[in-house]
Every structure is written in C-alpha cells, then in structure tokens.
C-alpha cells in the first residue's frame, strides 16, 4: 500500500467505458472463465488436471459464494448487481441461494449475453438484466435487500457518487458489497495508462483512499477483506486460456492483433499480480431512509 499514488491526467467517462466494453466483449469471452471477474483460489488449484478456463470458473463461483455469505442473502431476497457483466455471478447466486437478481450494465452487448444466459439456465423469471450506469442508477429508492458491485468501481471517475447511489437504491440498513482494485505498490504513469487502455480503468486508489471514499459517502464500514493473495492465480489462468485460444483469436481478430497481444497481455497480467491489490468491502447505509 502507498499514500502517494500515481494519477494519470485523463480519467475515463461512462461513455468511454461503455465503448470499451462493446469493443472488447468477444475478446473477454475468449481469455477468461465464465465471467471476467477475479476468482477465489486455494493453494494448488492451478496444479489440477482441469483446463484453465474451468479452473477459473470454479474459482469465480467460489468468490461469488463468498460474497453471498458476506451479504447473508437468503431465499426470497432481491439483489442488485451493479456492473453485471455477462451475468455469471448473478446466475450463480440465484441458482445456489434461491434469490432474485436484477443486473445492470452500461454495455448493451453484455446485457444481451447475460439475458441469453439467464434464459438458457431457466432463470429468466428470477434474474433480469437491463441498462444502468452506476453513477445514476435507474431504480427507485430502497428497492433492494442487498447490492453488490463486483469489479465495476475501477471504472468510476467518482466512486463517492457511486457508493451513494448503491446506498440510495438499497433498503435502509441493507448490506452493500463493493470490490476495489488498489495501488498496492506505486504504479508508473505508463502502467496506469496501460490499464486505462487494456481495462478502461480510472486512476487506481490506495487502500487509504478507498476508506476515505466510504467515509465521504456516509456509509458504515463493517468489514474489509484484502483478497490480493487469493486472487493472484486468476492472471496465471487467463494467460493459459489465452495461449489455448490464440489460434481462434488470430482467426477472429487477425495475426497482427494476436502478435500485439503476445507482448501486451503478459505485461498487463504481471502488473495486476505484482502491483495491484484487491479489496472487498462490506458496507451499510443509514438504518432509516
């Protein structure tokens, strides 16, 4: 952790993040597990006989279960998933915990894929997806029993506004779960620019700055889980998935694109593993509306 983070000059707008997701949707499907989230890994997981994509998906589902436990969701609860991606965490939570889920994304491609997956899983009656910006959620106040935002806050230029929006749409005193990527080791401007281009990340905060955002938003901090060591194998798995699918990536995007990925992806994954941290925060808004 550091108290003097590097900050590039130009954070991204919501429109730019949406455009990045639209452009990268097919690639994300080819180099990740069932979702593009970090997984919760156990020692030796990567040594098993299963393909890397399947191992990544198992770790991602384990992380989803961990987050469901933190929120203490129960059958009949209604969860809001802010930044739902392709819907895998929402579908896993609905299937395993008997809850209803509303997911939102600023990417129409993600909404289309998530809706398709919900129908294929026979969960379209309990899991629904639609357009929504974390900075201005299209939901009424106090409408959800729990809210999570998994790996979506690195895209937000104003995380305090985002946190206040999560609290606004949750019922009074409901739990909120938010994950943050942090600068665990000071990054260079070139590295943050790489993350801006590779993942559409706004400037990464320090651990201390994340806690400051929570305080500024007026939320109560109940737990902080530093999962940095537990998520690191995700990047190793993504590297293996990329190598397995490189031929398909070449067919879809061209040889020049694949050659550029050959050098860019290892540097990006190494930066995420070596210099960034990963925090999961359990929060609560005011107990009265």
Image (tube, rainbow, N blue to C red):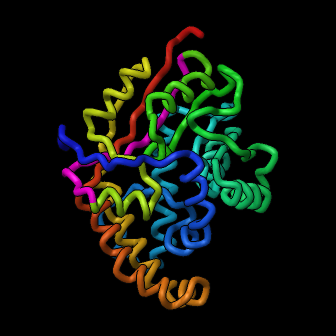
Q: Residue at x 55, y 60 (%)?
A: 20
Residue 179 covered by magenta stretch? yes
Which image quarter: residue 88? bottom right
Which image quarter: residue 147? top right
Q: Residue at x 56, y 8 (%)?
A: 288
In the rendered image, residue 76, in percent from the top left (x then y), is placed at: 70, 32
**Image-based side of 100 in relation to 254, left or right:** right
The residue lying toward the viewer, choosing from 82 and 13, is 13
**Image-based side of 56 in relation to 227, left or right:** right
Residue 174 covered by magenta stretch? yes
In the rendered image, residue 16, in percent from the top left (x then y), is placed at: 55, 53
Which image quarter: residue 109? bottom right
Residue 250 visible in the snapshot: yes
**Image-based side of 77 in relation to 64, left or right:** right
Quarter of the image with the C terminus is: top right
Q: Residue at x 75, y 55 (%)?
A: 115
Residue 227 visible in the snapshot: no
The residue lying toward the viewer, choosing from 82 and 119, is 82
**Image-based side of 200 in relation to 145, left or right:** left
Q: Residue at x 54, y 84 (%)?
A: 249
Residue 47 drawn above or below residue 80: below
Pick out the residue farthest to the top: 288
Pick out the residue farthest to the front: 9
Q: Which residues are magenta?
A: 173-189
Q: How many marks?
A: 0
In the rendered image, residue 24, in percent from the top left (x then y), is placed at: 57, 67
In the rendered image, residue 127, in percent from the top left (x then y), is placed at: 73, 45
Quarter of the image with the N terminus is: top left
The residue lying toward the viewer, choosing from 124 and 129, is 129
């Amino acid at each position: 952790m550091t108290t003097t983070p590097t900050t590039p000059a130009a954070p991204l707008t919501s429109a730019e993040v949406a455009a990045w997701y639209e452009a990268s949707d097919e690639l994300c499907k080819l180099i990740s597990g069932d979702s593009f989230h970090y997984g919760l890994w156990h020692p030796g997981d990567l040594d098993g006989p299963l393909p890397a994509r399947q191992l990544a998906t198992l770790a991602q589902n384990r992380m989803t279960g961990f987050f469901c436990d933190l929120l203490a969701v129960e059958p009949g609860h209604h969860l809001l998933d802010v930044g739902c991606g392709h819907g895998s965490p929402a579908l896993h939570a609905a299937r395993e915990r008997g809850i209803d889920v509303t997911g939102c994304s600023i990417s129409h491609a993600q909404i289309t894929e998530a809706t398709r997956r919900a129908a294929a899983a026979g969960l379209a009656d309990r899991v629904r997806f639609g357009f929504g910006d974390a900075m201005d959620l299209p939901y009424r106040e106090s409408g959800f029993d729990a809210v999570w935002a998994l790996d979506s806050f690195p895209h937000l230029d104003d995380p305090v506004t985002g946190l206040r929006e999560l609290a606004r749409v949750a019922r009074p005193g409901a739990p909120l779960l938010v994950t943050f990527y942090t600068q665990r080791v000071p990054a260079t401007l070139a590295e943050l620019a790489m993350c801006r281009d590779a993942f559409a990340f706004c400037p990464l905060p320090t651990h201390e700055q994340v806690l400051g955002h929570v305080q500024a938003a007026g939320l109560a901090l109940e737990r902080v889980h530093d999962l940095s060591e537990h998520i690191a194998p995700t990047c190793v798995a993504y590297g293996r998935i990329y190598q397995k699918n490189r031929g398909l990536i070449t067919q879809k995007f061209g040889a020049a694109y694949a050659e550029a990925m050959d050098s860019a992806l290892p540097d990006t994954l190494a930066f995420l593993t070596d210099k960034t941290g990963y925090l999961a925060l359990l929060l609560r808004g005011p107990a009265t509306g």
